[in-house]
Image: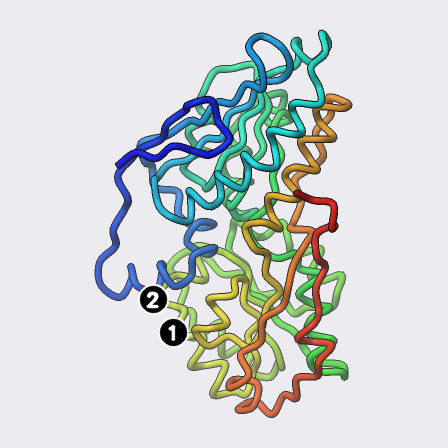
Amino acid sequence: MGFRLRGSDGYRASSPRRRGSGCRARIRRGLFLAALALTATAHATTTHEIRPEPVQGYRYQIVTTDDSAITRRIVDDMVRRLVPVFAVFRTELAQHRRMLYVTVGPAALREVAQRRCDCVVISTFTSSQVVRSIVGTLPAARAASFTAVYAEPAPDDQLRLVALLYRRPVRVAAILGPDTAFLKPILENEHVNVLQAEPDEDINRLLGQIAQTDVLLALPDSVVYTPENFRNILLATYRHKQGVIGFSADMVKAGALATTYSEVEDINAQLAEIVAGYVAGGELPAPQFPRYFHTIVNEGVAHSLDVEVPDNVRNFARPMPAHQP
């Protein structure tokens, strides 16, 4: 089924929607951002090309891999934000800048990374783990033309949320797989107890090693947070009166204690800022975690863990600027 995007000059996108089956699919549907961040399955790729005017100005393409309702929402909002940005820069200099691809999800990033092009790429709605695993296979010169707004919350925002929730020194643990090991120095600098998980390692053994900590900081890692492991993690931490700080709002709805999270519009606002900086100066910033966020708390879980939730926790947020479209 095809769809036409508002604000375009007639570009069209269509591809079949993936359908899951059984418990695994239900969990993945429930954890939308986590699924986007961890799934790297190939799909038929759809490209939306936008030209503010023929020949003049920049050209950019939004690359997606499905025709789902959430993808339509993402792309519609991107188009609304990016068309005005590009329309401002219609100079001779701009015409010589490289094509800019914006990828939505890991499969789109993987597909664009395999293209041979003189282009720059901004990845969105993909975890830091997957971005690094894809871009890390590229030659250094090619990798330098990639940046990203990661899908998962910034660890420092999550740790600030922990401090607001508990209002006392607490012991925080995190379990990292091989592809999230790059976060270890950052977390250890914040006095987080970090365990390293190997592929196929027994999650219950690792959970036993952190049974004396107060909080488990969850990070999107395909070795640790598989759909099969997630239930065991929730049961074990609940039994030990540990709060789980999730990495998506739907994880909190499923039983985690709390998280900061970014809406589609928050991610796209940050993307628009990156694009505006690029078209103005020709430079890409380093990959970054979401800048704008809100907080969600599972009040029932908080009550069971005897964690009082003050209003400053519920209101913990960094909203996008009012001038954003």
Q: Is residue 26 above or below residue 1?
A: below
Q: Which residue is mark 2?
A: 228
Residue type pointed to by label 2: Glu
Residue 267 image point, x, y percent: 60, 47
Q: Is residue 214 above or below residue 82?
A: below
Residue type pointed to by label 1: Arg
Residue 40 image point, x, y percent: 39, 42
* Residue nearer the viewer, 167 or 199: 167
Give the spatial CA distance, label 2 vs label 1. 7 Å
Seen at 44% across and 54% down, the residue is 222
* Residue nearer the viewer, 68 or 173: 68
Q: Is residue 102 above or below residue 193?
A: above
Asked if residue 233 lies left or right of residue 82, the reply is left
**Quadrant location of residue 145?**
top right
Q: Residue furthest left?
A: 21
Q: Which residue is mark 1?
A: 231
Residue 91 image point, x, y percent: 72, 11
Look at the numbered disc 2 and give the secondary structure of its residue: helix
Seen at 63% across and 20% down, the residue is 141
Q: Is residue 317 above or below residue 73?
A: below
Seen at 71% across and 80% down, the residue is 311
Seen at 29% across and 59% down, the residue is 25
* Mark 2 touches mark 1? (CB < 8 Å): yes
